[in-house]
Every structure is written in structure tokens, then in C-alpha cells.
């Protein structure tokens, strides 16, 4: 698989049609480079709702995006079909069962879809946007094997990614949206940790840039990156491909699930195999008595 993780600069985009045109240009450039799967960041399309509800507050911008979610997903589906690509359309706030969830959808070029709802919500999602947890982690069947999607904050929880890997995932996609350098650091470091501890690939695609007209996505930091195990057959630091901090554009890498099978069996360590089957508890002990001299 040739994977492209796209760092997406937030722009003032006033319509679904304008977003579709912007997406089409990006997909066309990547298709020309032989890319099989493109991933967008978490909340990338919120720029449309934010532009339409500018000045009304973050909740209104998110609500406007949710109202456009069906049309936005249709545009993403059309982009995937038009360019013959698989597309992770980042994620969107979507109304489901009387509440808002953060839903990431993977679009196949033939119109099929698979959905991963964000499992754990950050404080701003819960307290400021009113977005609720959506559901358990899943493993998605593709022509290259099973993939997982850990939406931003979910990548910071080893058990969430581990559930996907236990179900057969060899690649985890992390669409991200963070408004501070600290947040971007957490996502990047945790992505690299998940790749090491599960002996799998993990890829990150972030939103970028300052958008003072937009309250929901007013500042965005991060870097696109594709990471693997720091072990035999991989770079010593585990970095397969990585963009510079706060630099837009795609990072691209050719990924082979066979290399994951080999490192899990023949690596210097076997983190994937040696993961404890049961939760480990810690015993409580008292300080040792001083040693007599």
C-alpha cells in the first residue's frame, strides 16, 4: 500500500462544493503519485461549518458542520470514486440517536464505507462542543488486510489501539486535530509508542494553521507522520516518513504488511506477542528496613 498522510491547513471554505473542489485538487495530486489510500485530519471539514457560522461561537460552528455532515461525506465519497482511491475523510461531528458523535469514515473507491466513532472525548469536545463518545474500536477489512482508526485522543490510550491490533490490524490511522504544541506532541509521541508496543504501523494526519475567524479551529498544530517499530527491518527511530512541524502537505510511504509479520516473529523483541493477556496489578509494599552496618 502507498499511504499518504495529509497535513491539512484550515481555510475559510463557505460551501460543501468549495470543500469538494479543494479536496479534489489534493486527491488528484496524490493519485498522480500512485497513492492508494489518503488520510485527512480529524475535523478537517469543520472549516465549512465554521465559515458559514462565523461569529456565532464554536458550538454553532460544530452544529452547522453536523447539519452538513451527509453532504460532506457524499463529497468525500465522490472524491474517492473519482480518483480511484481509498479515503479516510478525517472525522466529522455527526448527529446520531439524539447526540453528536465524532465519526471517522473510510471510503472505498467503489462506494463502500466503514465507520469508526471516537471512543474517548477530550475536555473541549465534551465541555465546549457537546460531542459524546461514539462506540468501541473496530478493525476494518481492506484489500491490504485489516486497518484501524484511532481518532486523535484515542491514540493516547494503549488499550484502544491494542483492541484493534488484537483483531488483526497491522496499520492504525490517526486523524488528529490539536490546538497546542503540547497536544501535538502527545499525539505524535503516543503514535510512535503504539507502533513500538504493537509492532505495527501508525500514521498521523493533523489540521494546521491559524484561523482567527474560526472559534472551533482557531489554532492548529502538528506534523504528518508515518511510524513503525524501532526494530529489525525498520529505521532505528521507527520514523518511516515525517513532515516538519506545522508544515502542510502529505507525507507518503510504501507499507508492506509482510514486514509487520516478520518483525513480530523475528524482531530483537516481541512486544506484540509478549503483551500481557491479563491486566497487571501492582503490589503495595513498605520501605525496606535499613541494612545494619
Image (cartoon, rainbow, N blue to C red):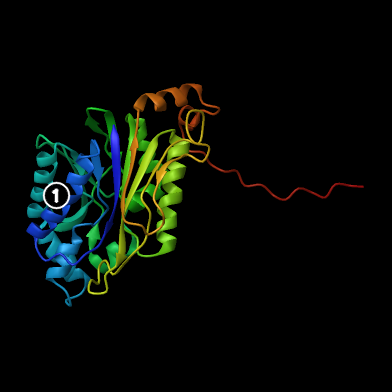
Quadrant placement of the N terminus: top left
Q: Position of residue 26 (x, y in %)?
A: 20, 50
Residue 225 relative to residue 87: left or right: right
List the residue tagged with mark 1: 24
Label 1, residues with CA under 10 Å away: few <14, some 14-19, many ≥20 = some
At 46% from the left edge and 34% from the top edge, which residue is drawn? Answer: 278
Residue nearer the viewer, 100 or 233: 233
Q: Is residue 234 visible?
A: yes
Q: How many marks?
A: 1
Image quadrant of residue 30?
A: top left
At 20% from the left edge and 74% from the top edge, which residue is drawn? Answer: 57
Q: Position of residue 241 (x, y in %)?
A: 40, 42
At numbered mark 1, what does the secondary structure look like: helix, strand or loop?
Answer: helix
Image quadrant of residue 171?
A: top left
Figure check: 248 above or below 110: below
Image quadrant of residue 251?
A: top left
Residue 179 relative to residue 15: left or right: right
Q: Position of residue 93 (x, y in %)?
A: 18, 57
Residue nearer the viewer, 113 or 235: 235
At 37% from the left edge and 23% from the top edge, which residue is drawn? Answer: 258
Figure check: 84 above or below 27: above
Q: Position of residue 256 (x, y in %)?
A: 35, 28
At 47% from the left edge and 39% from the top edge, which residue is drawn? Answer: 238
Residue nearer the viewer, 178 or 207: 207
Figure check: 21 above or below 281: below
Amino acid at each position: 500500500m502507498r499511504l499518504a498522510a495529509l497535513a491539512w491547513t484550515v481555510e475559510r471554505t463557505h460551501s460543501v462544493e468549495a470543500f469538494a473542489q479543494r479536496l479534489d485538487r489534493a486527491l488528484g495530486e496524490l493519485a498522480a503519485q500512485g497513492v492508494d489510500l489518503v488520510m485527512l485530519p480529524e475535523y478537517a471539514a469543520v472549516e465549512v461549518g465554521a465559515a458559514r457560522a462565523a461569529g456565532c461561537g464554536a458550538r454553532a460552528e460544530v452544529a452547522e458542520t453536523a447539519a452538513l455532515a451527509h453532504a460532506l461525506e457524499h463529497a468525500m465519497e465522490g472524491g474517492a470514486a473519482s480518483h480511484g482511491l481509498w479515503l479516510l475523510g478525517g472525522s466529522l461531528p455527526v448527529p446520531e440517536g439524539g447526540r453528536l458523535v465524532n465519526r471517522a469514515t473510510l471510503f472505498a473507491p467503489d462506494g463502500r464505507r466503514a465507520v469508526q466513532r471516537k471512543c474517548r472525548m477530550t475536555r473541549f469536545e465534551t465541555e465546549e462542543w457537546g460531542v459524546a463518545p461514539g462506540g468501541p474500536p473496530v478493525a476494518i477489512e481492506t484489500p491490504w488486510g485489516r486497518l484501524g482508526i484511532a481518532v486523535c485522543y484515542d491514540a493516547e490510550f494503549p488499550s484502544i489501539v491494542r483492541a484493534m491490533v488484537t483483531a488483526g490490524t497491522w496499520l492504525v490511522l490517526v486523524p488528529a486535530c490539536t490546538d497546542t504544541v503540547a497536544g501535538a506532541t502527545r499525539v505524535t509521541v503516543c503514535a510512535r509508542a503504539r507502533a513500538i508496543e504493537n509492532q505495527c504501523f501508525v500514521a498521523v494526519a493533523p489540521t494546521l494553521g491559524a484561523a482567527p475567524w474560526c472559534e472551533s479551529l482557531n489554532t492548529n498544530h502538528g506534523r504528518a507522520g508515518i511510524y513503525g517499530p524501532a526494530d529489525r527491518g525498520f529505521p532505528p527511530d521507527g520514523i518511516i516518513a515525517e513532515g516538519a512541524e506545522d508544515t502542510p502537505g502529505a507525507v507518503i510511504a510504501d507499507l508492506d504488511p509482510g514486514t509487520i509479520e516478520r518483525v513480530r516473529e523475528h524482531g530483537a523483541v516481541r512486544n506484540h506477542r509478549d503483551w500481557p493477556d491479563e491486566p497487571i496489578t501492582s503490589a503495595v509494599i513498605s520501605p525496606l528496613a535499613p541494612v545494619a552496618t
